[in-house]
Image: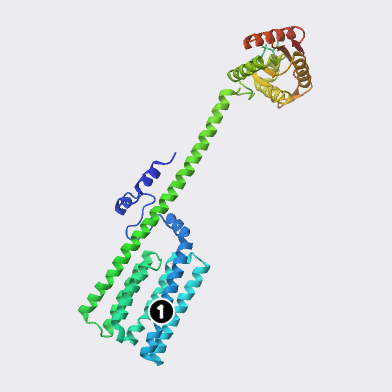
Amino acid sequence: MPSRHLLKGFRCLKWGQPISTHVAKGYEWSIKPWWGEFRNKEHEQAFLRQHAPLVAGQLQLALLVWMFLLLIFAIPDYLTLGPGTDFFILLAMRLATSVLILALFVAVGFKAQLAVQGRWISLVEVVAISLFMLVYFYRPDILSWTITVTLLMILGVIALVPNRLKAAVPVAFYMAVLTALVLLYLGSLDESEFVGLLVIFSLPIGIGWAGALRANVLQRRQFALFQQSTQLNAELTREIEMRKRLQEQLQHQATTDALTGLNNRHQYQQLFARELSRSMRLRQPMSLGIIDLDHFKQVNDTWGHSAGDEVLRRVAQLCRDNFRDIDILGRLGGEEFVVLLPDTTQEQAIIVAQRFIETLANTPIDIGTRDIQVTATIGVVTRQPDETSLEGLIKRADDALYKGKEAGRNQVMPG
Ligand SMILES: Nc1nc2c(ncn2[C@@H]2O[C@H](COP(=O)(O)OP(=O)(O)OP(=O)(O)O)[C@@H](O)[C@H]2O)c(=O)[nH]1
């Protein structure tokens, strides 16, 4: 049965449900409200593992765009600064950052898991951002442009570079504060403008955070729903299989004799009735034999009841081995078995029964401590053309069996 908590968790993960209600209950699949990650570490790892190839692709694209923009701005640098030291310092910064970006690009290509670990991306970002500050030093002429680019970079760090929020948000803050401090240091800002710039920079951080958080939560809810429905399906499949097995067991118990595994009275009566009507309809012969072990009481008395049980099991198996698949075997009770032989004349039935008697008499039965020999008497009858009653048939076979016992046992007696 799917657990109560699982079902509850499943219900609470509906689309559009506020994060807070989902989180408040502390369900297995709950999501951290600020970072949009699963509280459960194993679930988070499973999510990241599954998404790693996709995230790696997105990251590689973001890195390429980043590198392209970084390098393309070397052209305006050159046009403004000319081939002087300032230009080469900025170019060195652009190239060094590009190498770093390229290294991450290649590493992620080899190992997609790096893309979801966060710290490598953050490290490259922190180094690149620190180096980028050189632009403020060497290109004060484009201060407003650079601030705009920084704003976009702050947004990009959170919203465009696929990184975990927990890693991306501190990097964005680092960039905002460092930029404001550099500008304050360079004298481009006074204290109030410094505070104003921090406020302005906090806007893309907030917007990026909110957007990325929403995407994170939606992705994880989808993942959780999928996982839970997979889990539910697996549980249901297991449950169905278990019920099927149970049903088969019950069916087996209801139709077979517990000791010998042969058809029990209820079952063989049904099968016999079907066979009887088929025999009448098609006017085919049909014979029936009752097999009764001789002096079975002595077996019990001499070797014990469990040895007697073992003999009954072995004889049942011998019946299964010796009669045809279409013959229907049952345990009549005690040490008596019954066999119905479809499409079999009296002569054929006597031959078959005789063969069984001989096989049994010549088969030593292992009762654990030793081998013993048992014999049986069989009363055999064949349905008369006008005979329609099963009870009548069994009664006649029983009478024949009785005669066989009287006549000395270990023989086939036709009735
Ligand atoms: N071990 C064992 N014995 C059983 C079972 N059912 C019946 N019996 C025994 O089978 C014996 C049948 O004895 P009787 O009816 O006197 O028949 P018999 O000794 O075989 O003698 P004949 O049939 O006349 O040759 C009894 O001792 C029963 O207790 C069973 O399930 N297990």
Residue placed most toward the observer, 61 or 53: 61
Single out the residue that lies furthest toward the front: 282
Is the N terminus in the top left, top right, bottom left or bottom right quadrant? top left
- Residue 338 placement: quadrant: top right
- Residue 101 placement: quadrant: bottom left
Residue placed most toward the observer, 247 or 366: 247
- Residue 367 placement: quadrant: top right
Q: Which residue is mark 1?
A: 70
Residue 395's spot in the image, x, y percent?
66, 8
Residue 377's spot in the image, x, y percent?
73, 13
Image position of 272 with respect to 366: above or below: above
What residue is rendered at 34% in x and 61% in y?
213
Quick check: which quadrant has ligand 1?
A: top right
Residue 289's spot in the image, x, y percent?
70, 15
Disc 1 marks a residue whose amino acid type is Leu
Q: Is residue 177 left or right of residue 263?
A: left
